[in-house]
């Protein structure tokens, strides 16, 4: 066996695993890495090597309709040989671990070290930010020259499909020297591939891939391969792109490494979280932008405005996040101009809370600018949102005669608790939802501040008066004297006394919505019955509807998602309430730091360098949903930068 030269455990980086670490709890498959190019393209997979999910792969170029995208390049067949010994590094047609894997790390790119009796090979994969380019780097870390063959495998279609095989045969393939051009394939743009310093060799044939649940679920096609001979210490590169790339991949890789690397501080794992938060930002073409809610990716909507403060603080990319907020304003204008029944309302903005989060994002960003005294150019969009609520311009959502927001659209969930089973909302929450009205109150106050910046003082006074009346009515309607906390929903069927985390927003969003004694009562009941090490539960465990495990069939998972599962992003609102009720003292800081310890450890446990979407409500609180979620990352980052930074 080649000498590994592995570092001692105490000297490893926080996102580095040796072979013995990967074998604990099947980390080879449970640890998932992620790369993103800032244009909407991404790559992701497992620490063990071959992809095991439909959305895993080495290169998914930017495309519209993100929810339907799957990586075009699934991975590679990789063979290495030396002195009569031949080994397979990875084979995307099987779901087993990569051969000889002894180390996996993010440094800063996903990097794998494979060792065999006579040789040692290292491979890393990087997506270049701002360009649709993926680069696989191979380095000979042994003492002998080795031969290497890499055959990229492209997704074609369903297994055993004559149509898929016919499509593959008809796709143009051009090989010239170390470069190849393929496609277009499956509505994807033409793919450029380049194996630096090698001669491309045409291949043939489709192969089936074992996907999730170890069944063949797709066709993979490898029309070209590259062969190299690598002396000791030499590196070579395999590049994928939708553009012809003549730049030396080594220069691109080194520039990207320098861009990402920053000096470590006292919290290495939280530092890694902040460094990698940029994967959620899509910069677009310089005029547009968006925030990806999570990976696997989905269309931006309600969830894309909640992370605005935290992602801005974590990444320092004020311009990039500003483009995302501006793009959200444009989507809102399209929605309002198209009319409520046009079917053109963007995802999330058909909800009762999505547009209100947009208003708060605009106001937060206005305060965060270098000159916070300047009026925002998005004031017209903010006014449109408030007018739409008052005039009932969105289906089922309107401000009632009492000034509170009510939502009722049969068959459609209108709040963030939007799980569906058999086309029916699991938690319909029809009527006046507590967090929606806390958001409404906060949005009115935020809009008033924006109007004052624009010297529209009369408008500001009207909004402040409206917010005062909403606050008074809120307390009259939502306070439960019997339970001494807030009703979750007040609707046509009465008042819902379910203990859920939504009421924490009545404290976190405004300092004057609840009187102090009520704020304290809400804080303590949420802290005592809903707080877990990894987020707030969505339902009191004493409730007979409570489901502590978000596992099983799709139906069973949906039933548990908002009936007991714990959500990390809610820790942001809880932190606001914690410091608002108890003050900012060394003791309250220590308490918050203690509560974040489990999430800190989780950064190295599932989506490496990130935080999952949701966890089981009961121990051992297994992560579920997206392995990297923007709200989760952003809200934890916001806590760190707002309350815990020295």
Image: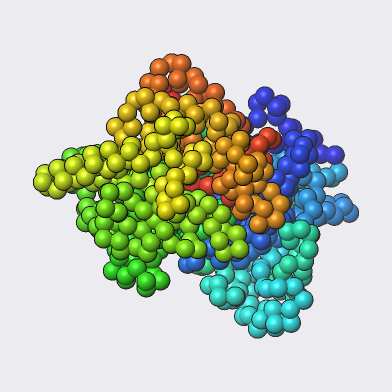
At x 26% / y 60%, what residue is drawn?
A: 391
Residue 460's spot in the image, x, y percent? 16, 44
Question: Is residue 169 shown to the viewer in this render?
Answer: no
Placement of 579 over or under 28, stated as above or below? above
Q: In this view of the protein, which residue sits in the foreground, 239 or 186?
A: 186
Residue 104's spot in the image, x, y percent? 69, 41
Q: Quadrant of residue 225?
A: bottom right
Q: Residue furthest top?
A: 586
Residue 96's spot in the image, x, y percent? 79, 53
Position of residue 319 in the picture relative to residue 262 (left or right): left
Placement of 351 over or under 525, stated as above or below? below
Quadrant where the C terminus sits is: top left
Position of residue 593 in the picture relative to residue 325 (left or right): right
Q: Residue furthest right?
A: 84
Residue 599's spot in the image, x, y percent? 57, 33
Placement of 639 over or under 388, stated as above or below? above
Q: In this view of the protein, which residue sits in the foreground, 46 or 121?
A: 46
Position of residue 11 in the picture relative to residue 517 (left or right): right
Quadrant where the N terminus sits is: top right
Count of labels in the image = 0
Q: Quadrant of residue 88?
A: bottom right
Question: Is residue 231 shown to the viewer in this render?
Answer: yes
At x 29% / y 32%, what residue is drawn?
A: 512
Q: Quadrant of residue 186?
A: bottom right
At x 62% / y 44%, what residue is drawn?
A: 545
Q: In this view of the protein, which residue sits in the foreground, 395 or 58?
A: 395
Q: In this view of the protein, which residue sits in the foreground, 496 or 201?
A: 496
Rendering colour mode: rainbow
């Amino acid at each position: 066996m080649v000498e590994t030269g592995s570092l001692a455990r105490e000297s490893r980086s926080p996102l580095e695993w040796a072979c013995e670490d990967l074998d604990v709890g099947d980390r080879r498959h449970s640890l998932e890495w992620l790369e993103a190019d800032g244009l909407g393209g991404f790559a992701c997979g497992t620490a063990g090597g071959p992809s095991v999910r439909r959305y895993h792969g080495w290169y998914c170029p930017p495309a519209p309709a993100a929810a339907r995208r799957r990586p075009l390049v699934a991975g590679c067949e990789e063979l290495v040989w030396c002195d009569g010994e031949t080994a397979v590094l990875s084979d995307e047609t099987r779901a087993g671990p990569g051969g000889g894997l002894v180390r996996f790390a993010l440094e800063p790119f996903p990097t794998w070290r494979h060792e065999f009796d006579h040789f040692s090979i290292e491979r890393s994969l990087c997506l270049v930010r701002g360009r649709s380019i993926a680069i696989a780097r191979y380095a000979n870390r042994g003492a002998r020259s080795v031969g290497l063959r890499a055959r990229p495998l492209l997704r074609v279609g369903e297994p055993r499909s004559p149509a898929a095989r016919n499509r593959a045969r008809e796709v143009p393939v051009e090989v010239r020297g170390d470069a190849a051009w393929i496609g277009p394939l499956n509505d994807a743009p033409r793919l450029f591939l380049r194996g630096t310093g090698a001669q491309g060799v045409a291949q043939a044939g489709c192969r089936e891939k074992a996907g999730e649940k170890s069944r063949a679920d797709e066709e993979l096609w490898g029309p070209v391969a590259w062969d190299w001979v690598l002396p000791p210490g030499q590196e070579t590169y395999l590049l994928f792109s939708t553009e012809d790339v003549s730049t030396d991949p080594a220069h691109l890789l080194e520039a990207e490494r320098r861009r990402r690397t920053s000096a470590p501080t006292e919290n290495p794992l939280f530092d890694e979280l902040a460094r990698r938060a940029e994967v959620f930002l899509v910069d677009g073409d310089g005029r547009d932008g968006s925030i990806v809610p999570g990976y696997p990716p989905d269309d931006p909507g309600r969830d894309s405005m909640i992370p605005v403060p935290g992602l801005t603080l974590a990444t320092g990319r004020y311009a990039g996040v500003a483009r995302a907020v501006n793009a959200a304003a444009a989507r809102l204008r399209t929605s309002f101009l198209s009319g409520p029944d046009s079917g053109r309302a963007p995802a999330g903005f058909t909800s009762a809370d999505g547009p209100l989060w947009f208003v708060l994002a605009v106001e937060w960003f206005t305060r965060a600018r270098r000159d916070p005294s300047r009026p925002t150019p998005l004031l017209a969009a903010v006014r449109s949102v408030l007018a739409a609520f008052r005039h009932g311009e969105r289906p089922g959502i309107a401000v009632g005669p009492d000034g509170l927001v009510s939502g009722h659209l049969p068959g459609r969930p209108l709040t963030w608790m939007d799980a569906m089973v058999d086309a029916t909302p699991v938690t319909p929450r029809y009527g006046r939802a507590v967090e929606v009205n806390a958001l409404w109150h906060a949005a009115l106050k935020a809009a008033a501040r924006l109007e004052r910046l624009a010297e529209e003082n009369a408008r500001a006074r009207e909004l402040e008066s409206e917010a005062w009346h909403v606050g008074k009515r809120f307390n009259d309607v939502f306070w439960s004297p019997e339970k001494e906390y807030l009703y979750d929903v007040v609707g046509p069927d009465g008042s819902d006394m379910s203990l859920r985390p939504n009421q924490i927003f009545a404290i976190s969003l405004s300092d004057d919505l609840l009187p102090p004694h009520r704020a304290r009562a809400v804080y303590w009941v949420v802290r005592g019955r809903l707080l877990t090490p990894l987020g707030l539960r969505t339902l009191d465990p004493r409730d007979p509807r409570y489901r502590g495990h978000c596992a099983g069939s799709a139906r069973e998972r949906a039933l548990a998602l908002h009936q007991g599962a714990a959500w990390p992003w809610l820790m942001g609102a809880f932190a606001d309430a914690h410091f608002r009720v108890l003050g900012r003292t060394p003791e309250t800081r220590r308490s918050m730091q203690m509560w974040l310890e489990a999430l800190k450890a989780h950064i190295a446990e599932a989506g490496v360098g990130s935080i999952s979407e949701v966890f089981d409500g009961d121990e051992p609180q297994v992560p579920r949903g997206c392995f990297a979620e923007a709200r989760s990352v952003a809200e934890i980052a916001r806590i760190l930068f707002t309350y815990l930074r020295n």
